[in-house]
Image (cartoon, rainbow, N blue to C red):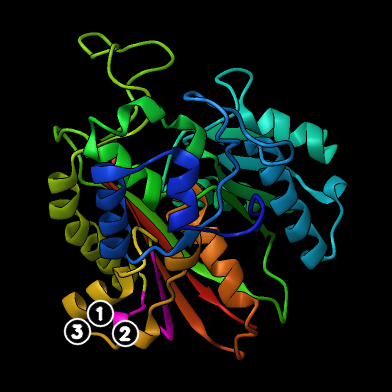
Amino acid sequence: MALPGPAVATEHLLDEAGLDGRERSLAKAVAERLGIRTRHVGRCWSARLDALREGADNPTLAARAVGAALDEAGLKVGDLGYLIGHTATPAQPLPGNITLVADRLGYRGPHVELRQACTGFANALMIAMGLLSAPNARPVAIVGSETGSVFLDLATLADEAGQIVNLVQMGDGAGAIILGPPVPDADRLSAAWFGAIGLDRSPGLQMRKGGSAAPGSNSQGPLGFEHDFSAVLRGGAELFEAGIAAAESRGLALGEADWIIPHQASGKVGTLLARHLGQPEERFFVNADRIGNTGSAAIWIALAELRARGLPRGTRTLALGAEATKYMFGGFVHESA
């Protein structure tokens, strides 16, 4: 994992954003309700439409995370057979963010990028597992990275409560994993899945401005992310339940998981899901209270932090991803060696 500098407490964040009066009170109340105390932010806070600090741009964070994962695996970048990236907040539309990651790594091989948010990890796994099924397959690196802090127009904060939610909820960062063909005495992913239940449903989260507008879309919408919070709330439980059903169909019942990593939508997601699912809260691993919602990077960062604790052999971790853009779900089962 890679994070851009030290954790930023809510009060300091609001100072940087120049919030006061009613907007500041609202932002503090939202942060408290979400249970997010700190997050890591790469933004310079020097302008309404801003830039990232040196070393905090999306490709650099992604390359740092991949480099750390390679070091842990005892591999060099030249050992990789494929590099897969997923992000909703690229450094630029074209060439893809992952090409810039490859430059920073000195990686000469094939690569691909998914423009996806919170379930990008799951689609990346679908691709990686296909690649790794080939004879003599070489390791595959997957990296999710987000720098959403610069996709926020400070001029909208006074008029759009949703942008205040984005301000206090989101964090910048990157997380990576190295996958290879099965070998003895190594951690493994024993199952993975991706699915969608969003056919004909309006997006719960979208960014409409930037790039080519689809026919009939509102290309003059505000810069940054737009939430339909009521739709996201209604769809959240449904997405997690779809992920649990996928895990059970692959042989892992919810009660058999030692750890559960839900999408890090808030610092209170573990409490809420434990209550909804009738499971002990202590089995849910949540870090959004410390690093915010890092979107596409969230699941990989959480897995990295959990594995860093030193999981006993045979520990089974169930990852449950949920994405409100068009109501997608995904996950995997991780088994420690």
Near mark 1 (Cα within 10 A), the count class, few <14, some 14-19 or many ≥20, is: some
Amino acid carrying label 2: it is: Glu
Name the image quarter holding the N terminus. bottom right
52 or 277, which lies in front? Answer: 52
Tag 2 residue: 281
Instruction: Tell me which residue sits at (67%, 68%) in the image.
Output: 182
Report if the CB atoms under discs 2 and 1 are less than 8 Å apart.
yes
- Asked if one can make out residue 123 in the rendered structure from this viewpoint, the answer is no
Q: CA distance from mark 3 to mark 1?
A: 6 Å
In magenta stretch: residue 253: yes
Tag 1 residue: 274
Q: Work out whether 284 lies above or below 291.
A: below
Nearest to N terminus: mark 2 or mark 1: 1
Q: Work out whether 64 lies above or below 247.
A: above
* Count of numbered marks: 3
Residue 116 is drawn in which quadrant? Answer: top left
Residue 88: x %, y % from top left: 46, 36
Q: Secondary structure at mark 2?
A: helix
Instruction: Tell me which residue sits at (72%, 79%) in the image.
Output: 184
Amino acid carrying label 3: it is: Gly
Looking at the image, residue 179 sits to the left or right of residue 125; the answer is: right
Q: Secondary structure at mark 1?
A: helix
| Label ID, residue 278 | 3
Residue 209: x %, y % from top left: 36, 18
79 or 50, which lies in front? Answer: 50
Q: Work out whether 328 lies above or below 268.
A: above
Frontmost of labels 2 and 3 is 2
Numbered range of the magenta stretch? 251-262
